[in-house]
């Protein structure tokens, strides 16, 4: 006779649910948005089925829907009118992100608005920093990132998310925010961001693919995990409030290690390529979108992520009820 029968805990749906150890909840999901200039724009992003370029009026409508599904936080990206060598549209007071943040915060007081701070969507060469010849100049880029962060905070952002993977970017952002009276604006740091092949669809959305070389001199090498912990530690020391690991699904080990080691909220970015793979496989009738997406997102939570940045955002609340 067998005394231990683990199958007892799997007998009915109700029991399985009752003993489940990991709960996915829309309040832990951060929904990314791509804001564009204009009015009435809702342009599908081909590489990311179900994701759109939205003008601010449509952004408000979409956020209204998202909130009904339980979403509490958004991550905002902007597509500027024009790009140049230095990404100077990125810190304009009437830039697309700044306008979007002001309008969104006016309409949704409780919504947590996080802004991505980087240059790749704003530079004509598509790199995340200021270039000198073929090199990315770390310290010149820090000054630009700080300037962008300040303009986002001035517009009303709750959290700034520096994403260029420059050394010292969290410190640079923290210092300028503190100096200008934005002590309460938080930092969600893209801490362990890998040079990943999963970013392809996003680069199409932002038209931000590097025009020469790649991002391997600033984003992390996917063969490393100790180094990810050093990146995270450094960002915590520089004042990050939340740290992020990106991508998520191919990096569950990093999420797990970070959760064991650090005592800080951890976000994981389930990136565009990870999203689109599920979408395209389900469109081709190969998998069930809902079931696979919930399995993937739950695994990210189970590994230790407190927050998940996910393009499935609005679906999750609907799927779970
Ligand atoms: C770069 C940035 C990237 C993403 C967000 N910000 C990656 C890159 O182009 O190197 C990717 C997000 C995604 O793939 O969903 N600042």
Image: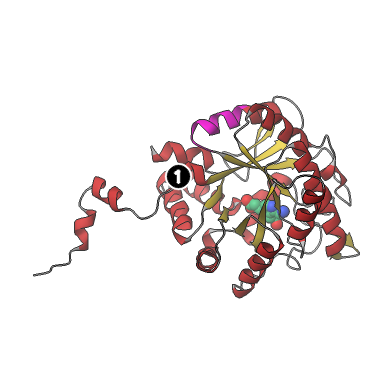
Q: Quadrant of the C terminus?
A: top left
**Residue 290 image position (x, y, % from top left):** 42, 44
Is 105 situated above or below 12?
above
Q: How crowded is mark 1: few (under 14 residues within 10 Å), some or many (20 or more)?
A: some
Q: Is residue 222 visible?
A: no
Residue 23 located left or right of residue 79: left
Residue 3 in the image, given as x and y percentages of width and height: 13, 67
Colour style of the rendered protein structure:
secondary structure
Q: Quadrant of residue 43?
A: top right
Q: In this view, does 301 lie to the left or right of 194?
A: left
Task: Give the labeled residue for mark 1.
Answer: 25
Q: Which of 104 and 321 is in front in this view?
A: 104
Is 308 situated above or below 219? Answer: above
Question: Which residue does the image show at 63% across and 31% down from the upper left?
Answer: 109
Magenta span of residues: 61-71
Q: In this view, does 153 lie to the left or right of 321?
A: right
In the image, residue 299 sits, relative to residue 87, either above or below, namely below
């Amino acid at each position: 006779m067998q005394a231990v029968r683990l199958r007892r805990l799997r007998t009915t749906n109700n029991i399985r649910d009752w003993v489940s150890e990991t709960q996915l909840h829309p309040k832990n999901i951060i929904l990314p948005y791509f804001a564009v200039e204009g009015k009435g724009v809702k342009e599908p992003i081909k590489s990311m089925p179900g994701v759109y370029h939205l003008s601010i009026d449509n952004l408000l409508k979409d956020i209204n829907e998202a909130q009904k599904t339980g979403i509490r936080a958004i991550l905002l990206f902007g597509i500027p009118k024009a790009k140049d060598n230095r990404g100077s549209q990125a810190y304009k007071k009437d830039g697309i992100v700044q306008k979007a943040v002001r309008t969104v915060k006016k309409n949704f007081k409780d919504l947590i608005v996080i802004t991505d701070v980087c240059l790749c969507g704003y530079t004509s060469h598509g790199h995340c920093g200021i270039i000198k010849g073929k090199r990315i100049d770390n310290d010149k880029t820090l000054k630009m990132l700080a300037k962008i962060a300040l303009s986002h905070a001035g517009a009303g952002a709750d959290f700034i998310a520096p994403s260029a993977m420059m050394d010292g970017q969290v410190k640079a952002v923290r210092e300028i925010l503190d100096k200008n009276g934005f002590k309460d604006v938080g930092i969600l740091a893209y801490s362990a961001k890998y040079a990943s092949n999963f970013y392809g669809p996003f680069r199409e959305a932002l038209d931000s693919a590097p025009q020469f070389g790649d991002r391997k001199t600033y984003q992390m090498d996917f063969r490393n995990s100790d180094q990810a912990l050093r990146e995270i530690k450094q960002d915590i020391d520089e004042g990050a409030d939340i740290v992020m690991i990106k991508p998520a699904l191919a990096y569950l080990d990093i999420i797990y290690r970070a959760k064991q080691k650090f005592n800080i909220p951890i976000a994981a970015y389930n990136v565009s390529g990870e999203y689109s793979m599920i979408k395209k496989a389900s469109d081709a009738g190969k998998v069930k979108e809902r079931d696979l997406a919930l399995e993937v997102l739950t695994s990210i939570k189970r590994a230790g992520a407190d927050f998940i940045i996910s393009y499935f955002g609005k679906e999750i609340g609907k799927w779970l009820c």
